[in-house]
Amino acid sequence: MIGEFELIERIAALQGADSGVRIGIGDDAAVLAISPGHELAVTTDTLVAGVHFPLDAKPADIGFKAVAVNLSDLAAMGATPRYATLALTLPSIEMGFVEPLLGGIGEALKRDGTTLVGGDTTRGPFSITITAIGELPHGAALTRGGANAGDNVFVSGTLGDAAAALAMRGHWPILDEAGKLARSRLEQRLAKPHPRVSLGVALRGVASACIDVSDGLAQDLGHIARLSNVAIVVDVSLLPLSRALQTVVPDPEQQWPFAFGGDDYELAFCAPPERTIQIECLAAELKLPLTCIGTVGPGRDVHLLDRKGRVREVPRGYEHFRA
Ligand code: ADP
Ligand code: MG
């Protein structure tokens, strides 16, 4: 066991070199530079054991995900991540737990060039709060309120993998070799989501509105619909589903609802049709599928249609404190 100050020293070791950090961990507050002509994007997310990750999750995955969900919010704004703070509440300082936890945090920060600049350490039931600070050229933020009738709706990567892994926890079917590989792929996407930081930055000036898919596609597109005063129509037959999901859930009618389950950390965005070629080039450049899943029109709310044009019910996303 080590003490609080020794722990902070270990945490300080995660801090990368960034010339923008005028004063970092060790003083009363951090003092940070930002690039000329830029403004800040700031976001905070808390992860609580049993709510945001299962009690038996690997500490390295918990650390990674705590950072990833914050960087995903910055990506959705089109911001470049720069700095982060870490508020850590621990019942005790068990190195077998803390070491890999810090390892996961450090790995996710490094992946997107983010520097840890401060935080707070307290005793109590385990929770982890990260604040991520990114920067944007003046006025370049991607918001939820900019979609226009006539835009197309796109989503990055594939949807539903994490939701399927969560739904099948504890009752996976018996799987062959390919099925086992697929299962581990789905579990990996739940445990260690990769925020779409490069995509978010590349969508500046391209997307009219953007959000990250965390609570579930319908709910998240619903935020865009409400704040943009538009209706969004999604064709569920266009939803990008991974080979892994299709392997584990062979019935197509049972596949697509997972795309509404949340925890994907993909970006959903709108763009006018004249941007489509640019978006296709971007997908090739980033080696990341960007799939058109629907359209924006006048009206309100999110509506789902299937290939035959039938209206489908929206599977509900995850809401905290839902009665
Ligand atoms: P204070 O009592 O002034 O809040 P602390 O002892 O909490 O100071 O923190 C000392 C320094 O260590 C500060 O620079 C703070 O930002 C940093 N720090 C404390 N806890 C963490 C943490 N969990 N992660 C990163 N930095 C931390
Ligand atoms: Mg403090």
Image (cartoon, helix red, strand yellow):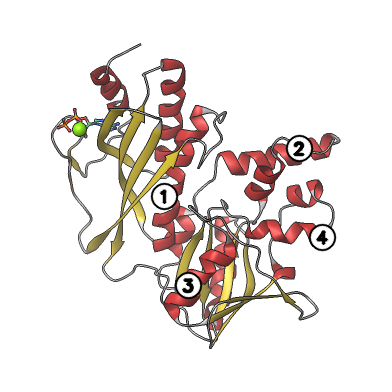
Foreground residue among 283 and 299: 299
**Which numbered marker is on residue 71?**
1
Gap between marks 2 and 3 measured at Cα: 35 Å
How far, Cα to Cα, is label 2 from label 4? 20 Å
Position above or below: 233 against 46? below
Q: Which of marks 1 and 3 is in front?
A: 3
Alpha carbons under labels 1 and 3: distance apart:
19 Å
The three-letter code of the residue at mark 4 reads Pro
Q: Which mark is residue 224?
A: 3
Disc 2 to disc 1, how far (Cα)? 32 Å
Give the structural element (helix, strand or loop) at label 4. Answer: helix
Q: Do the residues labelled 4 and 1 touch (CB within 8 Å)?
A: no
User: Are the two marked residues, 2 and 4, in contact with CB atoms closer than 8 angstroms?
Assistant: no
* Residue that label 2 marks: 171
* Picture residue at 53% right of the left edge, 53% below the top: 265
- Element type where label 1 sits in the image: helix
Residue type beneath disc 3: Ile
Residue at 62% x, 55% y is: 261
Residue appearing at x 20%, y 36% in the figure? 24
Please provide percent x and percent y for residue 281: 57, 67
Q: Residue furthest top?
A: 1
Residue identified by numbered label 4? 252
| Quadrant of res 160 | bottom right
Image-quadrant location for residue 119: top left
> Sequence order check: which comes first, mark 4 or mark 1?
1
